[in-house]
Amino acid sequence: MKYRYLGSTGLSVSELCFGAMTFGEKGAFLGAPDRNWAEFGVVSENTAYDLVYKALDAGINFFDTADCYKNGQGEELLGNALKGKRHEVIIGTKGRWQTDPNPNSLGASRYHIINAVELSLKHLKTDYIDIYHLHGFDPRTSLEDTLRTLDNLIRDGKIRYIGVSNYAAWQLMKALDISERLDLEKFCVYQGYYNIAARELEHEIIPLSVDQNVGITVWSPLAGGFLTGKYPRNQAYPEGSRLSNITPFESAPIANREQAYQTLDVMREIALQHDASIAQVALNWLRTRPGITSLVIGATKMTQLEDNIAALSWQLSLEETDILNKVSEREKPYPYWHICNVASDRRIKGDIYP
């Protein structure tokens, strides 16, 4: 296992982070009553423990969950599995979405954050959370109030670092500015949706994070299973699969599906050359991207976890990386195409800035 520093924290975290979103049985998502977390996988208690033990044996020291995963089951099973190993691992959890019928049990208000952190501590069976993420932006609560609350929780020793997930770049930058101006703890990590079939994070979030030394962790690096290559072109996705009815809420929105299939064709050839899986090619491509600290992987079966871990046993060549970059690159929206054109005399190969 290889490790990378997370932003400016000094924390060394494994390149793969094991996520517990699939842990537990059915559980409604109160923020969207028509959704159910079971759609993203169902893992029994014993299987969850076996997966965590396998991850630990492989050297994974970074684990991710959220209070809304299966109504707390994700946190509870992860906490049980890490009993006796707590001080050897980094645990990240998230709060923001509604987890009970109380109309104030949502958002990033002082009321909700304090209650959510206390409940997450109880679920995880720990007295501190390493990284507490806001799971999404709350337009109804002032960032200053949210940041003061998080800062107080750090000073109380209940959380150690703070991060965000699914923020726009301007929201993250505004928060960083408020923290600097008021001498509050800063967000040190951004968790976002990014993979070779969905490269939107490259427009603003990655340049911003690199510039501000904010670590980046990636959710859905395999685009909800699409980048395993198991969904044939020109065929309907199997009924009940995660990809059968993609919406922006689900785990794998892919804007240009035909280009994604063309990219898969190239990935399949590279996988054959390395006697590896297509999923391993997808993970290895992400490892080459600037600013990326760790990839949040999930599994419902041991074979899936073992295959993901095996991706770390080899690397793409520079030529293979260039080929994948070109086949997956999409036309840049305005103003990025304009910035690239007029700044061509200032750009160098591999530059992360638009």
Image (cartoon, helix red, strand yellow):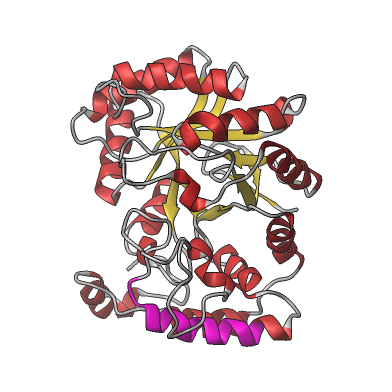
Q: Quadrant of residue 31?
A: top left
Q: Residue at x 35, y 34 (%)?
A: 97
26 or 73: nearer the viewer: 26
Q: Residue at x 52, y 17 (%)?
A: 158
Can residue 84 be seen at all in this image of the molecule? yes
Q: Quadrant of residue 201?
A: bottom left
Give, as a single range, the part of the protein colored magenta: 255-270
Whether residue 258 is in magenta: the answer is yes
Please give the count of numbered marks on the rendered protein: 0
In the rendered view, would you say 258 is above or below 289?
Answer: below
Q: Main secondary structure of the magenta part?
A: helix
Q: Position of residue 299 (x, y in %)?
A: 63, 53
Q: Position of residue 330 (x, y in %)?
A: 35, 78
Question: Is residue 39 left or right of 304 when viewed as pictured?
Answer: left
Whether residue 71 is in magenta: the answer is no
Question: Is residue 45 left or right of 31 when viewed as pictured?
Answer: right
80 or 8: nearer the viewer: 80
